[in-house]
Image (cartoon, grey):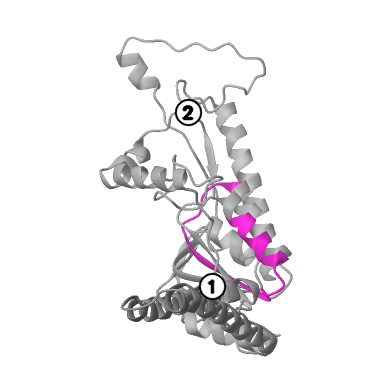
Amino acid sequence: MNGLNTAGRVAVVLVVGLLAGVVGWLLFVEVPTGTAELLGVLLAIAVVVGGLRFGGSIARSVFPSYNAVEIAVDGPITRDGGGGIPVRAPGSPGADDIVDLIEEADANDNAEALVLKLNTPGGAVVPSDDIRLAAAAFDGPTVAYTTDVCASGGYWIASGCDELWAREGSIVGSIGVRGSRVTASGLLEKAGLEYEQLTAGEYKEAGSPFSDLSDDEREYLQGIIDDYYDQFVETVAEGRETDPETLRETEARVFLGEEAAEMGLVDHLGTREDVEARLEELLQKPVDTTKLEPSAGIGERLRGGAEGVAYAFGAGIAARFSDPNGEFRFRF
């Protein structure tokens, strides 16, 4: 297949280059006369060069050279990559975009292997699981690779891959769940304000930032967190073929890559080049990897630029301390 693709790319480049040369010759050499001919020759050469580049672009599209795809999960995991807590840098793709990219790669006959580059401290529960399921459904070898951080929801995602690679200094683990909320009842009291809400259902108001938790509400919310934790441990244990008790004994701590490998939380330590060498072993052929990223329209790029300016001036940090909904959040 690679030999056929190479021959096809060369053929497309030559054909497009030849056509561009003929058109350039007719337009700038044959038709003009006199002193314009010299300039025409130069323009014809320029057209040929441009045609070769254009042909190369077409050839790479029609006959791609890659046989593996790399997709990055970067920063806190959210549904749409938007703001909120935890804060994301502007332009970072959300879980839905990442799932779409994985499914796109799975439908591509040239993508025989998938590399998930993980650099994330975790994030929302269900979006993390969506990415894990998409990776697990990929038809071919899947290798997760972390450079800096693969914690919590990132580790949940890695459990859907065949192997997890890390650097010796990578931070790995944090197999746990947390729930959080902002409490504003004391602030309302100091301001002389009272909060009143009409609800139906005993626990409908549980977790509201404007009222203190009762013992029953705290027990109810803690039960949800415990259920998420059990699901986390069982899913990771099944995906990585690990004893659930070994995962529980980590007590949601993080470990450097070397210790994580000794504990069996990581399969291999190595660089990006080592990961590619491993893919060549799995595919039993040379590997050429391409990176897939979500496409963005002009409007999205402009919006992302504006968000980037605001982020640089502190809007991102400010989001750490403000939640417009004030709701109770469950996160890996």
Left or right relative to 2: residue 34: left
Q: What percent of the width, then of the height, locates residue 32?
A: 41, 74
At 59% across and 76% down in the image, what residue appears? 59
Q: Quadrant of residue 157?
A: bottom right
Residue 122 lies, with reference to residue 143, above or below; the image says: above
Q: Which residues are magenta?
A: 98-125
| Res. 175 in view | no
Closer to the camera in the image, 184 or 283 = 283
How many tags in the picture? 2
What's the residue type where badge 2 is placed? Answer: Asn
Q: What percent of the width, then of the height, locates residue 44?
A: 43, 78
Between the C-alphas of marks 2 and 1, the distance is: 47 Å
Q: Nearer the viewer, mark 2 or mark 1?
A: 1
At numbered mark 1, what does the secondary structure look like: helix, strand or loop?
helix
Marking on residue 249? none
| Residue contact at pointers 2 and 1, CB within 8 angstroms | no
- The earlier-in-sequence mark between 2 and 1 is 1
Left or right relative to 160: residue 309: left
At numbered mark 2, what does the secondary structure look like: helix, strand or loop?
loop
Q: Quadrant of residue 165?
A: bottom right
Marking on residue 325? 2
At 62% across and 87% down in the image, what residue appears? 280
Closer to the camera in the image, 115 or 235 = 115
Closer to the camera in the image, 124 or 245 = 124
At 70% across and 71% down in the image, what residue appears? 241
Q: Residues within 10 Å of mark 1 (few under 14, many from 20)?
A: some
At 46% across and 25% down in the image, what residue appears? 209
Q: Quadrant of the N terminus?
A: bottom right
